[in-house]
Image (cartoon, helix red, strand yellow):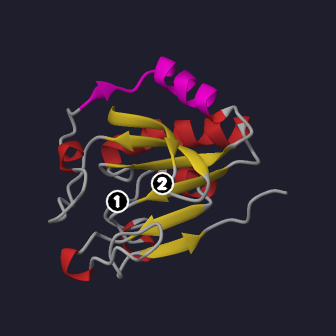
């Protein structure tokens, strides 16, 4: 799996200050996408154990609220095996930090058994994610006043309650 970028101090892709990983590869190819270069599965650099270590180090400070996974498309089948491991490691290392994930796919349609993007790793990913923002970006429904999403059709789904 490749990734396009790691933002160490992201304040736009979830609450508080976050570390965000932008993975490569997306078949949705939404018109008006803000990150078109990540559609290509070969874009960026290979994700390695060193990359994971870098993310974990950036997550260490107390002022970092959590981790955000976006892309590209985290739930493309080619990305899920690696990302299941990343999310599990982040969750185990920092159980009090929240995890957000953005996907152009829909939870009830695509990410359930029998869904178009369901793999042996999907449930592991979903168990680690606290908040899932799902749905394709639709340019005709773009609304810059929305918090943490780009178009009105996208949903912010709270999958799990965060530990206290």
Residue found 45% across the figure and 38% down from its top? 7
Residue 124 located within the stretch drawn in magenta: no
- Residue drawn at point x = 33 percent, y = 64 percent: 104
Secondary structure at badge 2 equals helix
Q: Residue furthest front?
A: 145
Q: Secondary structure at mark 1?
A: loop
Q: Residue at x 85, y 57 (%)?
A: 164
Left or right side of 50 for 26: left
Q: Residue 21, image x and y in percent?
A: 44, 40
For this rendering, which residue is in front, 149 or 48? 149
Reading the chain from its start, which is encountered first: label 2 or label 1?
Answer: 1
Relative height, residue 17 to residue 49 (above, below): below
User: Which one is nearer the viewer's eye here, 44 or 17?
Assistant: 17
Magenta extent = 44-58
Label count reads 2
Neighbours of disc 2 within 10 Å: few (<14), some (14-19), many (20+)? many
Relative placement, left or right, of 75 versus 98 is left
Q: Main secondary structure of the magenta part?
A: helix
Residue 117 marker: 1
Instruction: Determine which residue is flagged by label 2.
Output: 122
Most extreme residue toward the right is: 164
Residue 112 visible at all:
no
Left or right side of 42 for 92: right
Quarter holding residue 34? bottom left
Which label is found at residue 40? none
């Amino acid at each position: 799996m490749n990734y396009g970028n790691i933002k160490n101090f992201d304040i736009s892709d979830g609450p508080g200050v976050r570390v965000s990983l932008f993975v490569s590869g997306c078949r949705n190819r939404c018109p008006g996408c803000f990150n078109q270069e990540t559609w290509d599965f070969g874009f960026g650099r290979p994700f390695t154990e060193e990359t994971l270590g870098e993310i974990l180090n950036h997550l260490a400070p107390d002022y970092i609220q959590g981790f955000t996974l976006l892309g590209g498309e985290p739930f493309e089948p080619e990305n899920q095996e690696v990302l299941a491991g990343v999310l599990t490691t982040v969750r185990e290392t920092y159980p009090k930090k929240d995890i957000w994930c953005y996907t152009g796919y829909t939870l009830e349609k695509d990410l359930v058994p029998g869904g178009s993007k369901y793999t042996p790793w999907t449930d592991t990913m979903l168990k680690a994610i606290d908040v899932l923002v799902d749905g394709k970006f639709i340019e005709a429904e773009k609304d810059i006043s929305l918090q943490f999403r780009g178009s009105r059709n996208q949903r912010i789904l709270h999958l799990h309650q965060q530990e206290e």
